[in-house]
Image (cartoon, rainbow, N blue to C red):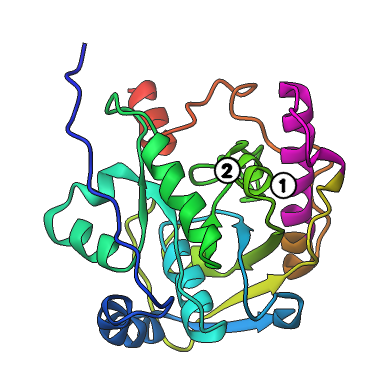
Amino acid sequence: MASKKSALPMPKFHATELNPQLRSVAIWLAPVVRLLFGLRVRGIEKLPKTGPYVLVSNHLTNVDPLAVAYFVYVTLKRAPHFMAKESLFRLPLVGKLLLAAGQIPVYRSSGNRNDEPLRVAHEYLKRGHTIAIFPEGTLTRDPELWPMRGRSGAVRLALDTNVPVYPIAHWGAQDILPRYGSKFRPGFWKKVDIMVGDQIDLSEFQGRKLTPEEVGVATSKVMSAIAGLVSELRGEPAPATLWDPAQQGQATTGNFVKAAKKGKK
């Protein structure tokens, strides 16, 4: 059995949302992102200018967090807070930068509980910030890069804190860095499109203890909203049924492409 790793520090709270620590990271990161790709946004008027909400998005490639963070910070002029996998925070320099920018580590396999990360996420929302989540929990396993079945974390967080959920979809990041690929092809002339959707109505699930089945229904509603936006961006219909890694015998964490290649050897 693997030994339990030490708990990670959590980001500090500041008096203002766009605080000096966040700006010190963004001041050099934002220009770098602008060199990697251009961003085109539709539907920004659907998002509140102030106040807390949970932002949910599809997950195509490891470039996605940069695209969404740039959208939140530069376009929305809000602080981007992600709940991100703990392995990133265990990298010496990267971890410090993520914490300084207000990102929240989420434990997966280190033996630690996620009580503290959830407390921090709740506090950010209580303070009027936004939390961005990729509900799939990892890069999509769908062969055609459609959103796959989601996890319940985003829904539970929104319902527990009684804040609205807004879906966004993006398309184009896969042309800069393929899913689990190594061929990095950046270019300021390349475009990543982001589309914002209407608030997802979860009122039927609020104010009561939900069964696992009801949580599943609410999560499916969120993923369907995201898939609908992806469909609009791609100009083609989304699958009637979202890809389910469990039914396909795929792991829900790690590089499943590399694992599949090793299995064929």
Residue type at tag 2: Glu
> Can you say whether 33 is above or below 14 in the image?
below
**Picture coordinates of residue 19, whole percent (x, y):** 34, 79
Q: Which residues are magenta?
A: 204-228
Q: Quadrant of the C terminus?
A: top left
User: Circle 2 sits on which residue?
Assistant: 136
CB-based contact (under 8 Å), mark 2 and mark 1 = yes
Q: Is residue 96 above or below residue 113?
A: below
| Residue 27 left/right relative to 47 | left
Q: How would you classify the magenta stretch by its main secondary structure?
A: helix
Q: Quadrant of the N terminus?
A: top left
Label whose residue precedes the other's in the sequence (2 or 1): 2
Q: Point out which mark residue 223 bears.
A: 1
C-alpha span from label 2 to label 1: 8 Å
Residue in front for this viewpoint, 117 or 90: 117
Q: Residue at x 65, y 41 (%)?
A: 148
